[in-house]
Amino acid sequence: MKEKSKKPFRQRLLNKYRLVILNEATYEERLSYKLSGLNVFLLAALLSLVIVVSTIILIAFTSVKEYIPGYDSTALRTSAINNIETLDSLTMVIEKNQDYINSIGAVITGEATKGEVQKEGERLRAESSSLELKIKKEDSILRGEVEKEDRFNALESASTKVKFILFSPLYGEVTSGFDYGIKHFGTDIAAPTKSPVKSVANGTVVFAEWTLQTGYVVIIEHSFGLTSIYKHNESGLVSQGEMVESGQVIALSGNTGELSTGPHLHFELWRDGNPVDPEDYVLFE
């Protein structure tokens, strides 16, 4: 038997075929298509090209690309940088707030601040160094002239030192004054329980809470670097963040807290982070 000669690939690619779809029950012809190997190849290539182009468009112009691992874009980098900057800013704000809270806690507990320690150290060093100086005749004459000038300028210095007027928080007998040596940074004013306690000036309430040692405490921040503190109150009439005016009733005095020894108001005045003698600024009697 003679073998059939194998047709070339081009001839087989151009051979005509017919695709027929029949009804299985009746063998009725429903659809039929004329095909060739070349048509099938071109159709498959076209379909593959459409799928590839559609995938590229989908990735390039939609948000699907963000879900592809390792894919990076300018928008993502910009967003990451903005998030890092925001995180750094929030961290700084939290640190500042924590420092502020710590300073408020130091005021409430009566602890000395860093500025006080430095100021006291400088004063002690100045006093010790002055003892080592030899008194000379020329120095004595110069010192006398300076003291004379200071006496004439005393009134001027006093008038320029205080640039604000403070309202008395409570009128009564002063039972204990300011004493830096024993860390009594305020003035105690005896008063009946539930006497109205008033703000010494316009300001913002930065603290109004109950504490174990000093009872109900109100702290108000004013202008000129002033902060006023009212301790051992029976109750408070303002809340944190509230704006108050000079002379406004902010609390009712009492005898609260472990450190209280009787009905009174413990009033403190701090300027630029350091305690000052309230009696130098306010009249209580």
Image (tube, rainbow, N blue to C red):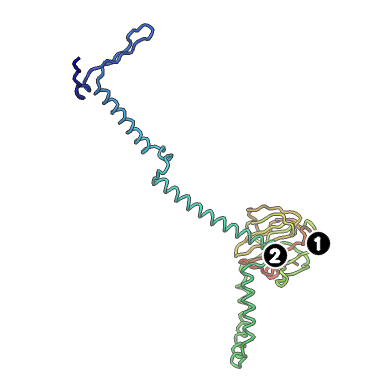
Q: Give the residue drawn at x 34%, y 31%.
A: 51
The residue lying furthest to the front in this view is 1
Residue beneath label 2, please? 110
Amino acid under label 1?
A: Gly
The image quadrant where one finds the N terminus is: top left
Query: Could you say where residue 44 lies in the image, as x and y percent from the top left?
Result: 30, 26
Q: Earlier in the sequence, mark 2 or mark 1?
A: 2
- Mark number displayed over residue 180: none
Q: Give the residue drawn at x 36%, y 9%.
A: 23
Name the image quarter holding residue 181.
bottom right
Label 1: element kind = loop
- Of badges 2 and 1, the one in the foreground is 2
28 left or right of 87?
A: left
- Residue 164's place in the image compared with 126, above or below, is above
Amino acid under label 2?
A: Gly
Mark 2 Cα-neighbour bin, 10 Å: few <14, some 14–19, many ≥20: some
Residue beneath label 1, please? 262
- Between 145 and 76, the residue placed more toward the observer is 76
Name the image quarter holding residue 5.
top left
- Between 150 and 235, the residue placed more toward the observer is 235
The residue lying furthest to the bottom in this view is 137
Name the image quarter holding residue 67.
top left
Query: Could you say where residue 64 lies in the image, as x and y percent from the top left?
Result: 41, 37
Separation of residues labelled 2 and 1 (CA atoms): 19 Å
162 left or right of 178?
A: left
The image quadrant where one finds the C terminus is: bottom right
- Between 161 and 256, the residue placed more toward the observer is 256
The residue lying furthest to the top in this view is 26
